[in-house]
Amino acid sequence: MNNIQHLRYAVEVAKTGSISRAAENLFMGQPHLSKAIRELEDDMNITIFRRTPKGVEPTEQGEQFIEYARRILEQVDELEALYKPSGVKKFSLSLPRASYAAFAFTEFAAELDDAEGLDIKYRETNSTQVIKDVGDAVSNLGILRCQREHEKYFLSALAERSLGCEPVWEFEYLALMSRAHPLARRPELKYGELRLYTEIVHDDNSIPAMPVSEARVLAQKHEKKKKIAVYERGIQFELLCRVPSTYIWVSPMPRETLDRFGLVQKRCSDADNAFRDFLIFRRNYRFTSEDELFVKKLRETVAKVKAETEPASA
């Protein structure tokens, strides 16, 4: 085989699905990258990629090759981290939009602030993309969120990608709203009451495929007369504060975050909102000291939010 760099080329092409985009990401010319991939295929005596109308994709043999290549590169990176320390602390995480996780992340980042160098990546996205990010080594850790009725599907998807998981916690979604919302003083809400108000939704959620008949029933059950679709978390706080009739479903939030924005979170007694979050990682991945520190902060934050939330919703 040529060298480790050729493996990096192949993994990047598989990740982007495009020779030209991969070449841009690798800061090299497209002809040079195409030549390197051909050399790798000739050396291994397999066809790694096939062309499609949208770009390129791995062949069946290519998928197996890319998986082995990722494992080799992970081990090489671990060796370099052990014996060629750079002084740069690295960490990468993909996760759903969750204020408790964001709080844990800021606590984690604060402890690293005096490091000589930092290379930290924090990516908010949907559950399907979290699995892809961790499986493709875009992120070393991920937080996977799934509704209980979809848990079997997502756990199967983890197994297919050789990903391990640990439960973080199980919770019910709460209705987050301004303290000025007409329902803010109610101790507990009914789902039907919320249908009169504008719901803020994140419009890039991804759930498993289901039969059309089931999808129609689910769509009718959750059909909204008034909604605002957003794609980033910052705007939701502005909307909740400035448009007091709005609300959004969220995982339980730290008290500090609620107080900062003048918000309350309300339990809805008849909403089917049971979720579970999992910490996910590649099974052969070796946790760094930074990973361990983040997990510690995450567990501490969950315990804190549970203590603040459960008595109020009992």
Image (spheres, grey):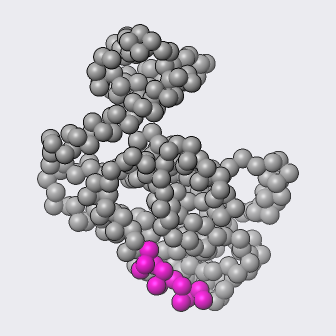
Question: Outermost residue toward the right?
Answer: 213
The residue located at (83%, 58%) in the rendering is 217
Residue 46 among magenta residues: no
The percent position of residue 159, horizontal first and vertical second, equals 55, 47
Give the vertical position of 112 relative to 246 (above or below).
above
The percent position of residue 101, horizontal first and vertical second, equals 43, 65
Which quadrant, please, contains the C terminus?
bottom right
Give the vertical position of 222 relative to 206 (above or below).
below
The residue located at (37%, 75%) in the rendering is 300
On screen, residue 115 versus residue 73, left or right, reads: left
Which quadrant, please, contains the N terminus?
top left
Res. 294 image quadrant = bottom left
The percent position of residue 256, horizontal first and vertical second, equals 40, 78
The residue located at (44%, 74%) in the rendering is 302
Q: Nearer the viewer, residue 61 or 84?
A: 61
On screen, residue 215 versus residue 81, left or right, reads: right
The percent position of residue 287, horizontal first and vertical second, equals 32, 54
* Residue 233 visible somewhere in the drawing: no
* Residue 140 visible somewhere in the drawing: yes
The residue located at (48%, 67%) in the rendering is 168
Give the vertical position of 305 relative to 243 (above or below).
below
Q: Nearer the viewer, residue 108 or 187?
A: 108
Q: Main secondary structure of the magenta part?
A: helix
Res. 293 image quadrant = bottom left
Residue range in magenta is 302-314
Give the vertical position of 26 relative to 165 (above or below).
above
